[in-house]
Image: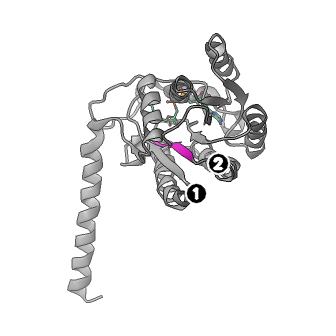
Amino acid sequence: MKDVAGKVAFITGGASGLGLAMAQSFSAAGMKVVIADIEDAALEAAAASFAESNAEVITVKADVTDRDSMEEARAQTLDAFGKVHVLCNNAGVVVYGSVAEMTAKDWDWVMKVNLDGVINGAVTFLDDLRSHGEGGHIVNTASIAGHYGIPGLGVYCTSKFAVVGMSESMRLDLSADNIGVSVLCPGVVETGIGNSERNRPSEFGGPAERDPDSQTDTGVEMEVMQPSVIGDIVLHAIQNDQFYILTHREFEPAVQQRIEEIHHAFAYWANYREANNV
Ligand SMILES: NC(=O)c1ccc[n+]([C@@H]2O[C@H](COP(=O)([O-])OP(=O)(O)OC[C@H]3O[C@@H](n4cnc5c(N)ncnc54)[C@H](O)[C@@H]3O)[C@@H](O)[C@H]2O)c1
């Protein structure tokens, strides 16, 4: 979607971190933006940060795990701007720790936000993106954790692998409708993600004390990026129809190692079948 000026973007988890950076980059490019988020204080701060410019930005309270709430946010979006062209399924949370320590509520919460949230975004907005015939774009925020298994991040990796897989299929399904798809897969960016528990509802166990030493070891020396860089990168990906947004090159060897292991496994089992005549 080369020509983004005047187009409408809906961003989940838009009041903080990467989502807010996307809102800033999109707005600077002349887009109309809906910032959707679950956190009241962050929504207020985001609204205030755009108040002095003439930017066409609105904030709406929406919980991506709740389809009624998303439907309500959709109604507010259409009331304000009439159409939706760009959907950023970006809200996400993390729980650190070995899968051996994860409770059912840890699994449920992370999968609900990170996977069901993306599904709910698509279910809520796909018809709107397709119906106006002006083309559109979906950006699903996954992570580099959607490309190789990382110890201490099993629940998060599970959710992000799913988002990568969903995005790969979506891209093929939606190209006929002139809807591009991108999957955003960053490494470390300086945001509030490490303090995700602040938004954990009581039905999923409520906010847990975070052990500052429990963060995961990716086995890679990592660059910490600023969100604004990612906001501009996402805008570029939309304008240039780039599918994989892989921003942190230090992870390439780890991903390559996974690809090679898969390649060797194909050969191993082909040899096995030949040797055993099965
Ligand atoms: N920061 C990183 O290093 C990094 C790396 C890779 C991927 N990501 C992904 O980027 C996305 C954005 O996270 P971030 O890093 O900007 O963190 P963040 O905590 O700064 O922002 C996430 C936003 O999502 C909102 N949110 C949480 N639960 C929600 C719900 N149920 N409904 C609606 N909104 C909800 C939060 O209120 C917050 O504003 C996430 O999907 C995250 O997994 C982040």
Q: Position of residue 37 (x, y in %)?
A: 66, 30
* Secondary structure mainly formed by the magenta segment: strand
Coordinates of residue 67 in the picture (x, y in percent): 74, 46
Which residue is found at the position 64% from the left and 51% from the top? 133
Q: Cβ–Cβ below 8 Å for labels 2 and 1?
A: yes
Segment tinted magenta in the rendering = 136-142
Instruction: Say which amino acid is labelled 2.
Output: Leu
Q: Which mark is residue 129?
A: 2
Left or right: residue 22 compared with residue 260:
right
Q: Which of marks 2 and 1 is nearer the N terminus?
A: 2
Specify the label residue 120 is tagged with.
Answer: none
Q: Position of residue 91 (x, y in %)?
A: 58, 36
Image quadrant of ligand 1 equals top right
Residue shown at 64% from the left, 48% from the top: 129
Which of the two residues, 96 or 22, is positioned nearer the viewer here? 22
Q: In this view, does 170 lie to the left or right of 251?
A: right
Local SS, label 1: helix
Q: Which residue is drawn at 55% across and 57% down?
A: 174
Q: Residues within 10 Å of mark 2 (few under 14, many from 20)?
A: many
Viewer-proximal residue among 253 and 214: 253
From the top left corner, tell me how far across and down residue 43 is, in percent: 67, 22
